[in-house]
Image: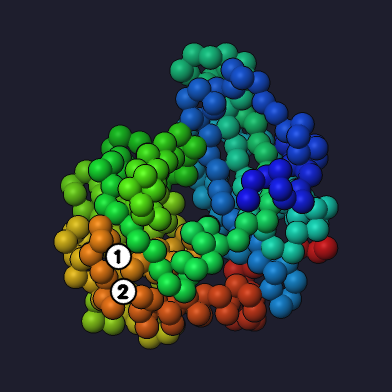
Amino acid sequence: MGFDEMDVDTIWMDGEYVDWDDAEIHVLTHGLHYGSGVFEGVRCYDTENGPALFRWEEHLDRLYESAKPYDMEIEFTKADLTEATKELISRQELPSCYVRPIAYYGYNSLGVSPSDCPTRTAIAAWPWGAYLGEDALENGIDVMISSWRKHASSQIPTNAKTTGLYVNSMLAGEEARRNGYAEAIVLNKEGNVAEGPGENVFLVRDDEIYTPGLSESILDGITRDSVIQIAEELGYTVHDDVSISRGELNTADELFFTGSAAEVTPIRKVDNVVIGNGSRGPVTEAIQQRFFDIVEGAPEEYDEWFEYVEM
């Protein structure tokens, strides 16, 4: 569904609520030319206790941490962005939505150095269902190993969520879709599994769970962290600092993606090799079910994971 088909009309920009169609920037904005921006993707769920941002504090922390390597000073405090986001959701009466905070170097000069450019900040929110499709959550998706590799942290910070870096993700994802797959898996420069274009990867073998460590050039996903905690509370052993070879994907009992957009999505095939029995496996199902029980029910024991929005 395109934005024009959605019932959204407001974006927050630099302290002001503006009409959706008027949320514009100059064509010589530094971030447009050099990818010098940082952003987050956050889900607001319609829980049993009302609309709530999922792990909002952790997303805000990562936004500000992502800005550090780029010497970017976000002029608004975390409290400012929290208030703005909750008001934005309330104004548009969105009980559930996807939220995109972004900070970027704006318009002033167009040398590679952004030192003369102001930092601009914006927040948008809109309805967004299952990222890879409702059917994918139950039946899984087919993925391919991309020919594009993930850059190393010695080249560009891999744990900063930077706009320009997602060219890598776009190339990998579009390559997969051109070849008839729903999504890609990207290997790092050593040829080990890194992540998906917008997801972390989990592997299940003999009822134990494995996921690439931060040294494998992955983004430290917040849904990844949530799923690790959930899995351990369900009694599973989780190895969260491992290297996974490409070949190990083919012999896994189960594979699944995690991400704020993708949530918990099973993988049924890699390069047309059937994973396990070719459907959502029991470990994936147990974790997925518990994840949705939490984000839809907001139980008291997970209260710190939610920032509630008054409508």
Of 133 and 83, the residue lying toward us = 133
Q: Residue at x 18, y 59 (%)?
A: 245
Q: Tell me if residue 124 can be seen.
A: no
- Residue 302 in which image quadrant: bottom right
Q: Which residue is mark 2?
A: 278
* Residue 269 circle label: 1
In this rendering, is residue 105 above or below 273? above
Q: Residue at x 36, y 66 (%)?
A: 267
In this rendering, is residue 57 above or below 47? above
Q: Position of residue 309 (x, y in %)?
A: 76, 63
Of 103 and 115, the residue lying toward us = 103
Q: Position of residue 232 (x, y in %)?
A: 40, 79
Q: Position of residue 70 (x, y in %)?
A: 47, 32
- Indicate left or right for 207 with 119 as reference: left
Of 131 and 245, the residue lying toward us = 131
Check if mark 2's residue and mark 1's residue have beta carbons within 8 Å: yes
Q: Residue at x 46, y 18 (%)?
A: 112
Q: Residue at x 23, y 71 (%)?
A: 252
